[in-house]
Amino acid sequence: MAKGIDFELKKVACAKGEPKDPELCALFAACSPGGESANVTVPLLEHEVGGQMFRMIESGPCAEYVDETWPDRVPLWPRDPKQRFAMRMFLDTAGSAGFIGPLFWSDWAEKIEEHVPKLKLVNSCLEKYSTPDGDFLLDELSMAEIMIGPMIQRWQIVGEIKGFNGLKLAQDLGLDRFCRWANAILSHPVFIGSFPDEFIAKVRAEAKPVNISYDVVDGNVTNIKAEAA
């Protein structure tokens, strides 16, 4: 979507713990080094080149393939080596920050306590490497947002359904640069409406909401409580 390239989106069954689409499983096994024993996930990208279908898996390689195949369409990887270093540092930091956690967390107090230092690292990374006056990591939407943006959507949308407001937590911690970046993602046309309605409906149906409270003292979260709503 960010590059304005025409594509066909095919949604198939791939939820954790449920039967998965047989065709997806077969194609994934053909691409994965693990073969039929591999854990089947999405995305799986198909691109016909010279009359032959090329298939690939995993978000990172798929995104890089699209960017390099259509380099003249809104390049997502910077050419400047210093900016590429900043991008790598940010992707490593934000990619391990646990933004998909609200999909799986049950021990909320413990997980929030573990999550806070990671949020601070992401904020520090943005403060150190991002364009000073911009909202995103670099001047324009880049691979940093394409890769981490969907995680931010899950973090905020799924979290709020279950009773966890990640952005409020970040605001309470004074992580202003992170909040500016996350809000820019959530309000960007590339991401608005891209989160599947059926997935949100499923999360709502299965959610066990909690009421979360905590105190912030000297930039640290204390007295975290999570009780059934």
Image: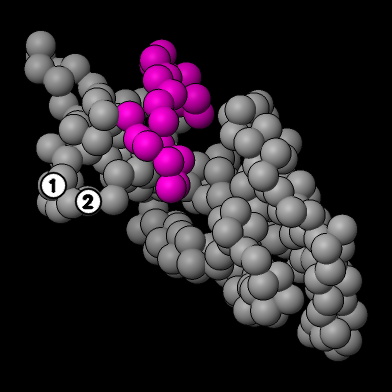
Horizontal side of residue 83 vs 65, given as left or right: right
Q: Residue at x 62, y 64 (%)?
A: 105
Q: Which mark is residue 199?
A: none
From this viewpoint, is residue 210 visible? Answer: yes
What is the crowding at mark 1: few (fewer than 14 residues within 10 Å), some, or many (at least 20)? some
Judging by the rendered image, the residue that carries numbered circle 1 is: 35
Q: Which residues are magenta?
A: 1-21
Q: 120 or 157, which is in the foreground? A: 157
User: What x and y, as percent, mark residue 67?
Assistant: 34, 35
Label 2 packing within 10 angstroms: few (<14), some (14-19), many (20+) = few
Q: Amino acid at mark 2?
A: Ala
At x 64%, y 27%, the residue is 197
Image coords of residue 134 (percent x, y): 68, 49
Q: Quadrant of residue 126?
A: bottom right
* Image coords of residue 15 (percent x, y): 45, 40
Whether residue 137 can be seen here: no
Q: Is residue 6 magenta?
A: yes
- Residue at position x 56%, y 65% from top? 98
- Residue 51 position within the rendered picture, expressed as x and y whole percent measured from the top left: 10, 11
